[in-house]
Amino acid sequence: MSETPKNPSPADLDRMSEAELVRLGTELDEVDVRHRENRWPEGVTTRAEKRAARTVTTWFALSALFALAFAVVYIFWPWEYRGEGEDGYWLYMAYTPLLGGTIGLSILFLGFGAVQFTKKFVPDEVSVQTRHDGLSDEVDRRTIVAELNDSWKTSTIGRRKVMGGFLGAGVGLIGLSAILPLGGMIKNPWKRGEMTLAGDGTLHTTGWTLASDNRPDGLPAEKVYLGRDTGKVYPDGHPPAGEGRLERIRVDDLAAGGLETVFPLPASALGNFEEHMHALHGSRNAVLVVRFRPEDAARVIKRKGQENFNYGDLYAYSKVCTHLGCPTPLYEQQTHRFLCPCHQSQFDALEYAKPVFGPAARALPQLPIAVDNEGYLVANGDFVEPVGPAFWERRS
Ligand code: FES
């Protein structure tokens, strides 16, 4: 064995073998290798070694298989909601447990494989290193590469193609499984679908758009009541026919100084529990109706062009914060401020819900309201601007 120079020149480094560079690296790093022993004799492959390789390969293969199963379940399993008793209910119910089970087993088997691989193939070594500070110099960099190469070679994974392949597949597929669910968040924000109680799929519409004279689907405006959520639930998931969740409200249902959250309730959906749930789940549907005391109503400052949006002392504003879209559920009656708990934006209800504190930059859009000939509160058209936070094409 040739003597390893302590301060090698670039020419020395070029001349040195990988083993010499490894030795130099450990010496320079002040690593004292106390004990090092390969797991298996070099040059011969024993039956025990083959058996160990098969065990590790099996763990990696199982890991890859379950990661693949996760991807298949994620993409192809019927995940759309099914109520109890409907066809496909149990398949729907199995979706989340299957996702959790497959990815969990994949990671578990990868862990088993990694532990077994380390115990059975990585050389048994005890080294002691003194900690030192500072940047790495050229010698350190060259020697660390040699050490890593040495680790790769002595781990023998380079020549165990099948095991290495399954290890790579397992790690790759688990990585893919972490990225894959992001696909579910990708949505074309311009794609118009059917106009429903949640809007038509674009950010410009809500359930209240059903009351618009200029509906994007070209159909005539519907009568849309302001629907109060009664909170009714049915343990078996089957409401009696004609039993709804939302109910219409009249002007006098709200006391002076009171506040109510309402959702769009089309006349065609009265008593239709399922449609009511769609209205409740429409992410831009919630509206705050506030009834000012007469002395407060006299101080209201209306927004230009929206002077007839209120009905008497009643004003309706979108509940979706114009900062980042949280619900704005708090109302401070003394100061007449709506408060958003997410980042503390405040909106002045007496002055067209314009922002007066916090990061929100736009007023809460106001919904025009009226009363029908039976005394129920109805939407008198759609919002005149998109609700919620900023987006690319928004002009207001
Ligand atoms: S979402 Fe309301 S203040 Fe940020």
Image (cartoon, grey):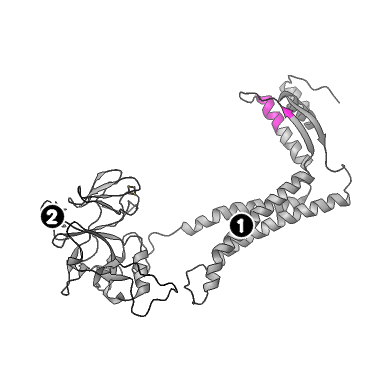
44 above or below 381? above
* Residue lying at the far bottom of the rendered structure: 241
| Left or right, 222 with reference to 134 | left
* Mark 1 element type: helix
**Residue 380: which quarter of the image?**
bottom left
Query: Which residue is depicted at the point 14% across and 61% down?
Result: 308
Residue 297's disc number: 2
User: x, y (%) of residue 7?
Assistant: 73, 19
Q: Residues within 10 Å of mark 2 (few under 14, many from 20)?
A: some
Query: Which residue is depicted at the point 37% across and 79% down?
Result: 240
Is 134 within the magenta? yes
| Left or right, 163 with reference to 213 | right
Is 153 within the magenta? no
Q: Which residues are magenta?
A: 128-144
Q: Nearer the viewer, residue 12 or 380?
A: 380
Mark 2, ligand 1, within 8 Å: the answer is: no
Query: Which residue is depicted at the point 53% across and 68% down?
Result: 93
The three-letter amino acid code for the residue at tag 1 is Ile
**Residue 75: which quarter of the image?**
bottom right
Mark 2 or mark 1: name the one nearer the start of the chain.
Answer: 1
Q: Residues within 10 Å of mark 1 (few under 14, many from 20)?
A: many
User: x, y (%) of residue 236?
Assistant: 45, 74
Residue tagged by mark 1? 103
276 above or below 344? below
* Mark 2 element type: helix
Image quadrant holding the N terminus, namely top right
Distance, label 2 to label 1, CA atoms, is 58 Å
Disc count in the image? 2
The three-letter amino acid code for the residue at tag 2 is Ala
